[in-house]
Amino acid sequence: MFRSKFIPLVSAAIGGLTATLVVLLAQPFGTSTTATRRTAPQRSGTRSFASQTTGALSAKQIYEQDAHGVVAIRASSTASSEGGDEGQSQPFGVQSGQTQTDTGTGIVFSKTGLIVTNDHVVNGAGEITVSFDGSSATTRKASVVGTDRSADLAVLRVNPTGLELHPLVFADSSQTQIGDAAYAIGNPFGLNWTLTTGVVSALNRQISAPDGSTISGVIQTDAALNPGNSGGPLLDSAGEVIGINSQIVSGSSTSSGQGSDSGVGFAISSDTVKAVIQRLDGGI
C-alpha cells in the first residue's frame, strides 16, 4: 500500500480500524432558474451508459434527481480465528468472535436490482442489507454477485420486486476537468442521503486497492467525504456519475480509528467502473 510520510490515506467508509499513519482500507467508506433538468433514462433489464445531458443543474436539482438512486449499505461480519490468509487483518478490523455492522453507500445501477459499491464496504461480510430512499423503512437483503478487489469494486443484487428503482447515469469521466463542480451523496457516519459539494481538485491520481494493486485515473475532490461515503457517487453538474467515492486523506482520526474529512478525497473514475462492470457482466 502507498504510505504517506505526513498524512494517511483512509477509507471513507467504515469504522473499527486501528489509527495508524498508513493507507487504511476499511475491511468489512442558489438554485438556477435557467438550468434544464435532465431525467435519467429508464432502463429495463439491460444497463446503459448513454448520457442524456441537456444542461447544468443546481445542487438542489441534482439532489432531487439523484438521491433516489443512492442507497445505504450495512454489512455485518463475525470474525473467525480459523482460516483466512496469514497476516491479513480480520474483516472490519474486529477481533475473533466479535460481530460488527458497518455502513457504506451504493449506487443503483439497473432496474433489475444491481447495486455498485466499493469492495472494501462489503468484503468479508456475512450479511448485507440495502436501504432505499434514505430510510430503513424499505430494506432488502443483498448478495454479492461480482467483485474486483484490484479495482476495489463490487456489484450487489437485491430482489427488485415491489421497488421503484432509479438507476443513475454513468458519465464519460475522460471529459472531466479540474475545476468542474462535484457533488457527493452518501451516508457519512450513517446519516443517510447527505449531500456535499465541491470541485474536481485533480485528475489521474493513484490509490491502493485492498489487495495492494494500484488504481489509476482516480479523481481527486474537495467535496466532503467521511466514513460511510465509500461506494457512493461523485456527480457532475448534470447529475451524472463521474466516480465512486473510495478514500480520503486524513491527518486525524476518531477513537475508533476512522479518519475525518480534510478536503482531499478520491473517487474511482466512472470509466474504470464501466470497464470493470463490463468485464464482470457475464457473471452477473
Image (cartoon, rainbow, N blue to C red):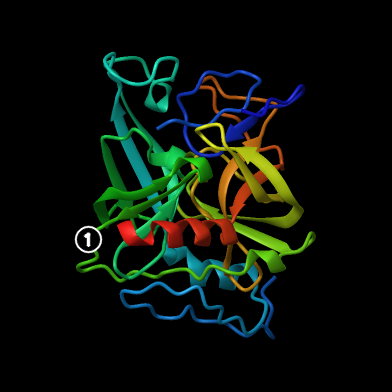
Q: Position of residue 146 (x, y in %)?
A: 35, 50
- Left or right: residue 122 versus residue 152 is left
Q: Position of residue 195 (x, y in %)?
A: 57, 56
Identify the residue shown where x is 33% and y is 38%.
Answer: 75
On the question of residue 284 being in view, the answer is: no
Q: Position of residue 60 (x, y in %)?
A: 59, 69
Image: 135 above or below 225: below
Q: To which quarter of the image does residue 99 belong?
A: top left
On the question of residue 45 being in view, the answer is: yes
Query: Which residue bears the numbered disc 1?
Result: 159
- Badge 1 density bin: few <14, some 14–19, many ≥20, Cα 10 Å: some
Identify the residue shown where x is 26% and y is 67%.
Answer: 163
Q: Please identify the residue farthest to the left as the structure is shown.
A: 161
- From the image, which quarter does the N terminus lie in? top right
Image: 185 above or below 120: below
Image: 206 above or below 252: below
Secondary element at image label 1: loop
Of 190 and 228, the residue lying toward us: 228
Identify the residue shown where x is 71% and y is 42%.
Answer: 264
Of 279 and 229, the residue lying toward us: 279
The amino acid marked with disc number 1 is Asn
- From the image, which quarter does the C terminus lie in? bottom left
- Left or right: residue 282 versus residue 104 is left
